[in-house]
Image: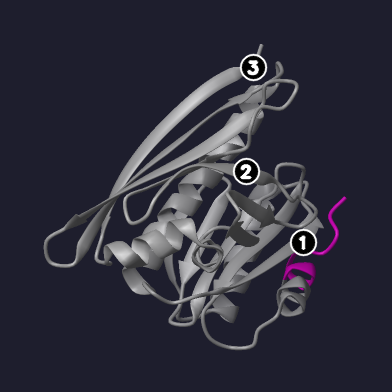
Amino acid sequence: MGHEFTSTDEIEVPASVEDVWTAIATGPGIDSWFMGRNEVANGQVKMAFGGYEPTSEVTASDPLRHFAYNSGKAPDGRFIAYEFLVEGRDHSSTVLRMVTSGFLPGDDWADEFEAMTLGGALFRRTLLEYLTHFPGRTARPLTVFGPMVSDWDEAWKKLDAAIGEKLPDAVEFHRNAHTVALRTEHGIYRFMRGFFGPVIAAHNIFEGDESEQDWQNFLDSTLGEQK
């Protein structure tokens, strides 16, 4: 059966056109708000997130105006495409229009689409937060896969309590059924419900030496191995 989808979002940010372009069209910029490690070169966008390493082809690149790329169609028809349109405004602000489209194959597309929709909302909101509070800066991405979770209601309660102790000055800027995101003066911290069961930490660190092992220890000690 499968499902074809398109979503459009528009944000206005207090950042320059140049800073917005860097955020959406360069590897270090994408690292600073998206997930994993990213590279934009030779007409391709490459991402490494855990063992997932997709490569997308750049389909439009008009500097400071228009950037787009897509995964290409798999044999089963699966694909995803991203498009960004940038427009400068007065008073050093910029409007960014984002279009995400694609096709999910199979009769079980609904669960994947829900996870993709909730995850997409997290990353779009993170982009807004990044361009508002950290424009022009480059983050160091941290990615950690924590324990498998069987009871997400209980897991979120434990995470909320532990996050409050570890990041007492953090400002929560986004939450939905699958994700929570917070900001400090040093970085952006996101926790996600992995599609196949684990909790995932996907952070963007601007200052400090915290490591993936630090956050691995945090997730393991907070949640343990659930049966």
Extent of the magenta region: 219-227
At label 3, which amino acid type do we have?
Answer: Gly
Which badge, 3 or 1, comes first in the chain's sequence? 3
Q: Is residue 72 left or right of residue 226?
A: left
Task: Give the residue number, with chain letter if any, for mark 2.
Answer: 56
Determine whether 78 is above or below 225 in the image: above
Q: Is residue 153 left or right of residue 18?
A: right
Q: Residue at x 68, y 46 (%)?
A: 55
Asked if the magenta segment contains residue 224, the reply would be: yes
Q: Is residue 82 left or right of residue 39?
A: left
- Can you say which quadrant of the picture contains the N terminus? top right
Query: Residue 79 got which mark?
Result: none
Q: How is the image coloured?
A: one colour
53 or 213: nearer the viewer: 53
Q: Is residue 202 left or right of residue 92?
A: right
Task: Give the residue number, with chain letter if any, for mark 3.
Answer: 2
> Is mark 3 in CB contact (under 8 Å) with mark 1?
no
Q: CA distance from mark 1 to mark 2?
A: 27 Å
Determine whether 131 is above or below 186 in the image: above
Whether residue 131 is visible here, answered yes or no, is yes
Measuring from the top left, give residue 174's x and y in whole percent.
44, 56
Instruction: Tell me the SS state at disc 2.
Output: strand
Instruction: Tell me the SS state at disc 3.
Output: loop
Task: Give the residue number, with chain letter if any, for mark 1.
Answer: 146
Whether residue 173 is visible here, answered yes or no, is no
17 or 218: nearer the viewer: 17
Residue sticking out furthest to the left = 90
Q: CA distance from mark 3 to mark 2?
A: 21 Å
Which badge, 1 or 2, comes first in the chain's sequence? 2
